[in-house]
């Protein structure tokens, strides 16, 4: 069972995708996949409800738009330079401890929605990433208890405007938070359905050409380390997202560098977490 949210932007309803691929509307049981849902052991309760056979679950039309599978996370915490080869292509040393930055939640969009270049963008870039969704409140969590705080995993394209990120004074958040710069989904896969998140192939294609191809085994800091480390500095709430970093192959690291242009198409995926696809369009209000 995978969690999905479907419908027009801002009007999404909760649903599930079964192993068969069939999608069911579960809005008669749960309001949304939000902080309260995850904090109340919602995934397990939803599984039990579906298993009763008494559930009222209309079938979702395959043509329905998919939104971000998590409703209004309080924050997206991203990890920079968490693959050694990506640090190398960025011209930076492998960090001795995790590099953290925020991505504004207003950047969140659906997995198949357009990515809109910001005004005067010159260096917008792609980044396929494994994202972790927190399942219960995490504060000063020990590494050996960290996985108990994970609800599941989701595919993330951490779009980044490199000029804003690296050439203008301030924190990286400016280059990460433009509208549509956080496509998440197509679904949230519960932790139990991904036995080893540290051995997943991940990839990204630009206009059909493979740009990134790696495996999460190359993470510098693994998921328990990240959950524990981040929880030292802030409380992570149920539904919050940790994006674990991108492997080598971003546009910044090419010679010469290559950046997104209107008309480009990005397609990306991670084992067990599905595939997403975004068309690049010009800025519009």
Image: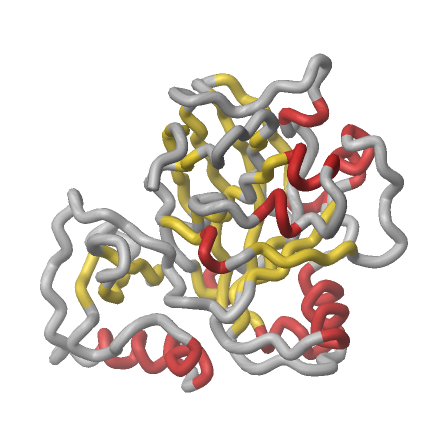
Q: Is residue 264 visible?
A: yes
Task: Please identify the quarter of the rendering in which residue 264 is found.
Answer: top left
Q: Is residue 17 visible?
A: no
Front residue of 161/202: it is 161
Is residue 37 placed above or below 188 in the rendered structure?
Answer: below
Q: Is residue 58 left or right of residue 248?
A: left
Front residue of 175/279: it is 175
Residue 101: percent from the left, percent from the top?
Answer: 69, 56
Residue 10: percent from the left, percent from the top?
Answer: 27, 60
Residue 173: percent from the left, percent from the top?
Answer: 64, 51
Q: Is residue 55 left or right of residue 129?
A: left
The quadrant of the rendering that contains the C terminus is: top left
Task: Please identify the quarter of the rendering in which residue 104 is found.
Answer: bottom right
The quadrant of the rendering that contains the N terminus is: bottom left
Residue at position x 63%, y 80% in the image: 138
Residue at position x 65%, y 41% in the image: 246
Is residue 210 placed above or below 176 in the rendered structure?
Answer: above
Is residue 123 placed above or below 257 in the rendered structure?
Answer: below
Residue 191: percent from the left, percent from the top?
Answer: 50, 65
Residue at position x 64%, y 55% in the image: 78
Looking at the picture, the colour scheme in use is secondary structure
């Amino acid at each position: 069972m995978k969690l999905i949210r479907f419908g027009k932007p801002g009007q999404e309803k909760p649903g599930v995708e079964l192993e068969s691929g069939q999608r069911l509307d579960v809005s008669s049981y749960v309001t949304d996949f939000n902080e309260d849902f995850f904090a109340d052991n919602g995934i397990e309760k939803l599984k039990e409800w579906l298993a009763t056979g008494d559930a009222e679950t209309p079938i979702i039309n395959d043509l329905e738009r998919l939104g971000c599978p998590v409703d209004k996370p309080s924050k997206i915490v991203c990890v920079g330079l968490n693959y050694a080869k990506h640090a190398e292509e960025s011209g930076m040393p492998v960090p001795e401890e995790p590099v953290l930055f925020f991505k504004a939640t207003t950047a969140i969009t659906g997995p198949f929605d357009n990515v809109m270049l910001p005004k005067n963008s010159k260096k917008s870039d792609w980044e396929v990433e494994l994202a972790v969704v927190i399942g219960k409140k995490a504060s000063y969590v020990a590494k050996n208890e960290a996985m108990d705080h994970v609800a599941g995993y989701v595919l993330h394209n951490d779009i980044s405007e490199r000029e804003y990120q690296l050439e203008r004074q301030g924190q990286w958040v400016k280059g990460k938070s433009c509208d549509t710069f956080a496509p998440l989904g197509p679904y949230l896969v519960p932790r139990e359905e991904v036995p080893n998140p540290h051995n997943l192939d991940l990839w990204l294609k630009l206009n059909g050409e493979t740009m990134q191809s790696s495996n999460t085994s190359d993470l510098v800091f693994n998921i328990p380390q990240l959950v524990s480390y981040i929880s030292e500095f802030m409380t992570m709430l149920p539904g919050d997202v940790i994006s674990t970093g991108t492997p080598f192959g971003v546009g910044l690291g090419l010679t010469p560098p290559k950046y997104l242009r209107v008309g480009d198409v990005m397609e990306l995926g991670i084992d067990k977490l599905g595939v997403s696809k975004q068309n690049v369009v010009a800025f519009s209000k």
